[in-house]
Image: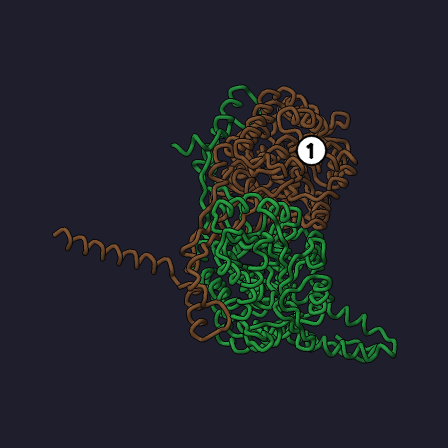
Chain colours: A brown, B green
Amino acid sequence: MEQIKLAVSGARAAYNQGKTRPLEFRIRQLKALERMLTEKKEEFLLALKKDLHKNPFAVEIYEMSGILSEISVAINKLPEWTAPEHVPKSMMTLMDTVYIHREPLGVVLIIGAWNYPLALVIQPLVGAIAAGNAAVLKPSEVSGNTAQLLGELLPQYLDKDLYPVIIGGPTVATELLNNPFDYILYTGGTNIGRIVMEAAAKHLTPVTLELGGKSPCYIDSNCDLDVACRRIAWGRFTNCGQTCIAPDYILCDKSIQDEVVQKIHATITEFYGNDPQKSPDYGRIVNQRHFKRLMSLLEGVNVAFGGQSDEEDLYIAPTIVTNVDPNSRIMQEEIFGPLLPIVTAGSADEAIGFINKRDKPLALYVFSHNKKLIKRMIAETSSGGVTANDCMIHYSVDTLPFGGVGASGTGAYHGKFSFETFSHRRACVLKSLGLEKINSIRYAPATDSKQKWTRWLLKKRRGGGKMRLLMLALLGALVAIMMKFYFM
Amino acid sequence: MERSGSGMQIVDLIVNEKIKKNLEIWRGWSRRSEQTGDRSQIYVGWYIMEQIKLVVSGARAAYDQGKTRPLEFRIRQLKALERMLTEKKEEFLLALKKDLHKNEFSVEIFEIAGILKEIIVAMDKLPEWAAPEHVPKNMMTFMDTVYIHREPLGVVLIIGAWNYPLALVIQPLVGAIAAGNAAVLKPSEVSGNTAQLLGKLLPQYLDKDLYPVINGGVEETTEILKQQFDHIFFTGSTNIGRIVMEAAAKHLTPVTLELGGKSPCYIDSDCDLDVACRRIAWGRYSNCGQTCIAPDYILCDKSIQDEVVKKICTNIIEFYGNDPQKSPDYGRIVNQRHFKRLMSLLEGVNVVYGGQSDEEELYIAPTIVTDVDPDSRIMQEEIFGPLLPIVTADSADEAIGFINKRDKPLALYVFSHNKKLIKRMIAETSSGGVTANDCMIHYTVDTLPFGGVGASGIGAYHGKFGFETFSHRRACVLKSLGFEKMNGVRYAPATDSKQKRTLWLMSKRGRCTTM
């Protein structure tokens, strides 16, 4: 525990030296991070294979490319993001310099999750570094090999003091949370999210919580079921279902349920062959605890396909469950595994009602040819994000903020949003010491005329923009006329 | 509902005014019956809880009906709010005079003007703010519709403070309404007259169910905080801020906390002391010093300390005359508790001007204190009163070091002709906001986010930032069900060529934007 205090205070001392302020320093660190991922790629592939049975293809798409893209965007945009942002001025500040100054928060804490052990720690780290902070990292101990590797490699590439890695389980995390940080970004389950926020509250530390929930997937009868089912199968069974934005359950009309099962079944065979346990592309459950949890969700439900398992191999087959009772256990918690329940809903109305009765999910998926229906589902529900006619794509666009709402989380990151998350936007007005006469109207003693003048100065006129344009136009016309007379 | 055992009747009630009236009846009853030892206190507590739950669930039911979604509805509410402030201005002036001895002039500048401006900006800009924000696409999504959809959070809670009892409740409310939320308001009971007036008037102008006002003290606030909200906006002290955030954490409710701290005011020797001192005096003594962004203490070189004192004295007399107690422009301390607190801060310090007080009138004269020891009590807590300590610092370096050793303040003030020095102070310290060569001005610019950092707060508002605070930014990607062949590269079984093509598709946006 002494070690934790030392690491945190070391990070703070290093931060206080001002090392992270120059943009060149931050860019150097980001480049070093990039080098680490390319030079040590084999080591990471090995660790991820041990932790989650991920193959190189999956690691490339789901972990590496996101991080590398994030690094490259940050390096490119950093001068733009950190420049003072001059804003429109009010009547009273017309003569002044008015801008938003972005500055680092200080020492931030990033707690990672085990399902994408690299991306969910490193992508936030990119934002924290870009914004000029020191960052203490706590990768998930559940994906232990990757955690160990990060603990070993990060100090070799990045500044040792500014970005320490702390390895350990719940006791270590609790101890860590007793220290004051200037920001905490946590990715993980809703219950632990609550604990993290309670700990943060003691120090008034702002938080971003990337949590989870049951992301609904509505399949309209008016849609290309072949394509829809393939995309849904991809979303559900990638990483053996252990993805926070995986489609958690399907809502569709009873009349298409069988067809949906059939097509997803066909897709599973297309992806993983007749025995997914033998496919090099199919993942494994991360540990025994989650294996047992998932198997228990299958009790008392109607398994239409799959359901085979091998505890020693931590293997659970891609499984589809139909005619699911909304009150069954499988519909009470986030599944986070390769089980796909289908709940029948008589109409879009019913589906919307069903979704709105539950916690706001991290993602909402709608499959339909009908654009109006899609817009309606978005308008009448809430969720962290939405992808229509596919799964998870909104995660991959760095110009979109990625985060939850309600029980699925607070705050967002990716791209510029990461930078903003780890920055303070400081409002700055630089006045001169002259023109004091104008100020005199605000000083006591109050008089009627002072009051009138102050009201006028503080007033915001309706359609101010248009007035300004009109005045500019008039001014322009006046100048044009004067010039005409002058040159005639 | 009947409580037959104790012979009382609880009247079913729906909103604010009635709650207060009934609670008073209940409290009176329970005080009288304490001697008889019956369990009415428990009934009162239960009663408060039930009524609060009713009010909050009423707001949620109204929100769920979808009333707040159309922009026209929100604009109508904002117009009604504007009408309330203009039509009932006299009533508000009276209430604010009773609560804080504010005169019409200061209510106009410091409360009403800001709110009216906020309303006008919101009404003007709402279509722009609420519209889908289309963002640059990457290679993989360039055929798709990609945008950020802003939507309301649901039912929010706004807890006001007592020093600007109108502005600190209504300005956040403007943002909450504009963003399409329902909002439960809890004005500060310390500025009781204004709180009562809000409780009476808001339901007359705004939708009764969507924007209920709950009045009461600590007990009521604690009960309110047990309910589930979609955002909590709190203005007040750091200690209570912590309690609010802890309560919010239980429901994973995001918070905006507008707290306080000791806002330092550095006066460089190279500056126009006349002007600087006048502006600082204005900042410090407005509202009798009870302003979260007032300059809390001065840092300056010992050599100019006397001159600073002299000039501020001159300004005090200029503003309030020789006996500020008689000036109609000088405020009063809000209550006995704060009066006593402030007087105790003066123990053991060197008062060079002012210091007079009148407990019955809650009057404390504009006061200056010099050669202050950084460890004295007056330098340990936010003053929030008309006392201005001067701490000497030999250099900008020393001042910066002094500031950085303490919690990040809500505001930083620097007075200097030297632009480089100003930039340096901004670069080497942190604070919610900064005004150089004046006080508090950054609060008035609606295009600037107003909020704290560290112990001085979380989040920000004013103008568009208010709208954003009370909105959820929902990332949306709308694809078509066509072009499935392109997606083929991402599906198992993995092959080398698939891997290559997928990486190309997901590659940096940088290349795409030149297309």
Quick one: A478 or A273, which is closer to the camera? A478
Q: Is residue B212 left or right of residue B498?
A: right
Q: In this view, does B426 lie to the left or right of A465?
A: right
Quick one: B441 or A149, which is closer to the camera? B441
Quick one: B269 or A432, which is closer to the camera? B269
Q: In this view, does A356 lie above or below A291?
A: below
Q: Quadrant of residue A322?
A: top right
Residue A422 location, x and y as percent?
A: 59, 42
Quick one: A47 or A486, which is closer to the camera? A486
Residue B230 location, x and y as percent?
A: 62, 55
Q: In which quarter of the image is the N terminus of chain B?
A: bottom right
Q: Which amino acid does label 1 sit on?
A: Pro
Q: In which quarter of the image is the C terminus of chain B?
A: top left
For mark 1, give the secondary structure. loop
Q: In this view, does B219 lie above or below B250?
A: below
Residue A131 location, x and y as percent?
A: 56, 39
Residue A219 location, x and y as percent?
A: 55, 43
Q: Is residue A392 above or below residue A358?
A: above
Whether residue B207 is visible, yes or no, is yes
Q: Residue at x 74, y 25 (%)?
A: A313
Residue behind mark 1? A139
- Given the image, what chain letter belongs to the residue carrying mark 1? A
Few, some or many residues within 10 Å of mark 1 (<14, 14–19, 20+)? many
